[in-house]
Amino acid sequence: MKRLCTLLIIISFLTSGTFAQQAKSVILIYLDGGPSQTDTFDPKPDATRDIYGNLKGFCQTNVPDIILGEKLPLLAKIADKYSLIRSMTHGANGHETGHYAMITGDLSGGSVVYPSYGAVISYIKKDSYKGILPPYISLTAANNRFNEGGFLGNAYKSFDTGGAPEKGFFEVEGIINRFVKPDDFKKRTQLLKDFELQNKVTKTPEYTLLVDSFRRVNTEFIFGESRRAFDLSSESKEVRERYGMHRLGQSCLAARKLVEAGVPFINVRTTGWDTHKKHFQRMNEMLPELDQALSALLADLDEKGLLESTIVVCGGEFGRTPRVLWEAPWNGGRAHFGKAFSYLVAGGGFIPGKVLGKTDKTGEEIIERKVYPADLIGTIYQLMGIDPKGTLPHISEGALPILPSLGKQGQSNGLLYEIIKK
Amino acid sequence: MMGQVTNSEDFSNPIRFQGKETESRCSDAVFLRRTYLVMTGQLPAAGQAQVFLESKKADKRSLLIDELLESEAYVKYMVMRWGDILRIKSEFPSNLWPNGVQAYNRWLYEKISSNTPYDVFVRELLLSQGSNYRSPAVNFYRAFLKRTPENIYQNTTLLFLGNRKFNDQGYLCFSQIKYKTSKEWKEEIIYIDNQLKPVVKSVKINKNSAIPLTAGEDWRKAYTDWLTDKQNRRFAAVMANRMWFWVFGKGIVQEPDDWGAHNPPSDPALMNLLTDRFIDSGYDMKSFFKLILNSDLYQSESYTGSLFASRRMPAEVLVDALADMTGISDEYRSRVPEPFTIYPQGTRAVDLGDATVSSTALELFGRVSRDISLESQRSDALTSRQLLYLMNSSELEERIRKSPVLNDICKRERNIPGICREITLSTLSRFPTQEEIALYRKYAETNQLSLRNLASEILWTQINSIEFLYIH
């Protein structure tokens, strides 16, 4: 069955070559917890204080008619490098369902658990991607709210780097080990080899062959190119500071280095966006870091000529209520809002300097061009050269659509042709 | 054919080794480690291993089997196995929520520790009603994302008959199930709407069986009566094969949830015999385990193509073994309810009971996500990335270097043969060979290592060895 499905996928690729691949890599900057669109990408300075809260100001960007929240001045200077979607919607207000929707595009409510788009991309690119690094990497850890591999299985889940890139020494789990020097590593692998030569318990030679080949690959992995791809100390102080010496900034810098190494999907996950309480205080702390890191990443990719082939996506599992909850216990907080929120997209075939979709004057209703998760993810697939109407193999159900919601009333509103290059 | 049971005599006297030409009996050390791992999900402690290996009792293997089946670790490991196929987790897609997860696990624990007969166990699950917090078995019905009678029926047949049934009307037996919420946070009541009129008088399940649907009654009962009837051999066979699969790593019907004419048992006589035994015992799971663990088939060596499939240790078991050997456990987190919960140091992965609670290492080694009720969702294949973690993870290296277990061993033993014995017993469940001791001694001398640093190198070597990673 599996083989048949793979064959079907190959055939569907050969027959549906109506679009060209424009992007080679995706960087997803995931604002875990659900960021407030009102204070970032869809400000409402003309509304009342119940909407804009303590952040009434805004930034005029370098694109006429586009404004951003007052805490994003650096991004405002380069609005011609990205586009905004102000009409994202899925209606789910629970973290797990919102996250599932935004990371799989599936709103069908079926009994099948879909893989995340990172897992799908690493599955489809598994033969064409030749790099030694894993095809799907999370800085520093993926969100484990559901099984990201979905029905494709664990093999396509992300590689979590662990460690803290903002510290002087970025320790990458399994690759860069602060305790063991390369010479000591070589000595102990020789000990292991000698130990196994004597061993009489193992009677399955195929395991010996398998394990030996993995050990060889891993040794290459530990000492070779991969080490350099994660080595932030090879970047100048100036570059590191441009991104910001915090977790998000240095993760974005690491993401750029991984794009240079050819990794197809990089997930930069930043937490703390679930701001039910102390919302405005938290925005004052977090938005400058986001502004610095994201603007540095976009500008740097652009200067290096990488933005054309790299998609940058930024958003969370949902937005937050445009209406501020002033009462106790929230005391000026914002709750979950899956009805209307914003995403930023850039590069890799997305047309920059545009705004897609529109919310009303309070931001509580979408009044123009709803965008569902499947529309965004399907567009990313298409730009990555993957047919959004293709299929994936399921262990017991045969071939399933890659995006079951795409094209369904109430779950999809069409791919984002308005903001992609022909 | 290897492993073929030609008559029931071979099997009824399983302790005596029959001396089949193709099979040779595994060593005590292999038997010890294998049995601990498959029945309890744990390695024997060094002391336990030493006592067993040095015992001169002729029946020490069957005594160990009895002892392990009475242990708490056996119960907990079975709760984990059931939790996988019943899809127990707090969040998506089962969404049982922590209260429901705990109630369900506690219920399973009680059922398994009292060795409830399998048919009674299934009846309690399928006939459950009430609140998901007060009547734990109803979580069986709550753990469905798609709560249609068709989906519930297909999942029920997958679990208890070994495949999803699409083509009969059996789903009508589940059409009275209704859900309602209460004022308690995330509480849900599952009840039977007995006002519903049956759309047909009886449901035809197969050529020979029809289940009557009587107005005013719980139709699940008629279905469950049919399902658990002794005449329904498939019901017993599927569970017998599942238990065989849990022990041997490979079902007589493989995959164990892919039954049907397209996939016959590899050894029909053996499958029949096991089914008879399971039914005759009154669906006694413990005595079934006892039967197969005492058999020659189980106690023979494993090699390429043998009946006992050697395989990588399952994720939870491996991660727990690393915690036991270093004395420092992994850190497990739950994201629901907020604020997030961090589990106390010493928590065992086997006992988590909730696929929403996890750690990076557990995910890496392929812990089951509990999204579907298929045994095949657990992959015990070794990957390059898993080996990378064992070879060169700072996190693991730190645990080895700081290990209070190794500190104790070095303080107690004070010499190379002593630490070799203790580490090898706890990691590989056997004594070290003279050659191994000589190898470590030479390594320590060449690299001028202290005893404690040598202990770290020995443990690193052993946990990276094929002997450790696989169940042989």
Image: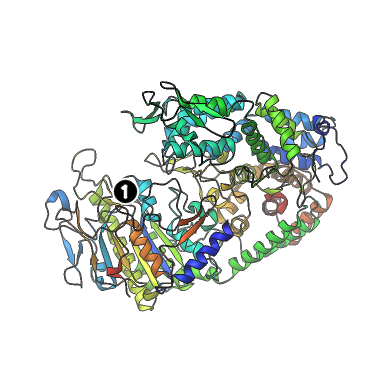
Q: Nearer the viewer, residue B82 or B423?
A: B82
Q: Residue at x 25, y 49 (%)?
A: A279
Report the side of A252 relative to B320 (left or right). left
Q: Is residue A75 above or below residue A94?
A: below
Picture coordinates of residue B152, whole percent (x, y): 47, 37
Element at label 1: loop
The extreme top residue here reads B216
Q: Which residue is drawn at 39% across and 59% down?
A: A247
Q: In this view, does B334 lie above or below A99?
A: above
Q: Which residue is drawn at 54% across and 29% down?
A: B210
Report the side of B464 relative to B50 (left or right). left
Report the side of B309 relative to B391 (left or right). right
Report the side of A39 relative to B61 (left or right). left
Locate residue A369: give its quadrant: bottom left
Q: Which of A25 and A128 is in front in this view?
A: A128
- The disc numbered 1 marks a residue on which chain? A
Task: Report if residue A246 is visible in the image.
Answer: no
Picture coordinates of residue B213, whole percent (x, y): 46, 25
Residue under numbered circle 1? A274
Q: Is residue A31 above or below residue B207?
A: below
Picture coordinates of residue A107, whole percent (x, y): 36, 51
Locate residue B423: give its quadrant: top right
Locate residue A89: give its quadrant: bottom left
Other residues around mark 1 within 10 Å, as few (<14) / some (14–19) / many (≥20): many
Picture coordinates of residue B184, whole percent (x, y): 33, 29
Task: Report if residue B182 is visible in the image.
Answer: yes
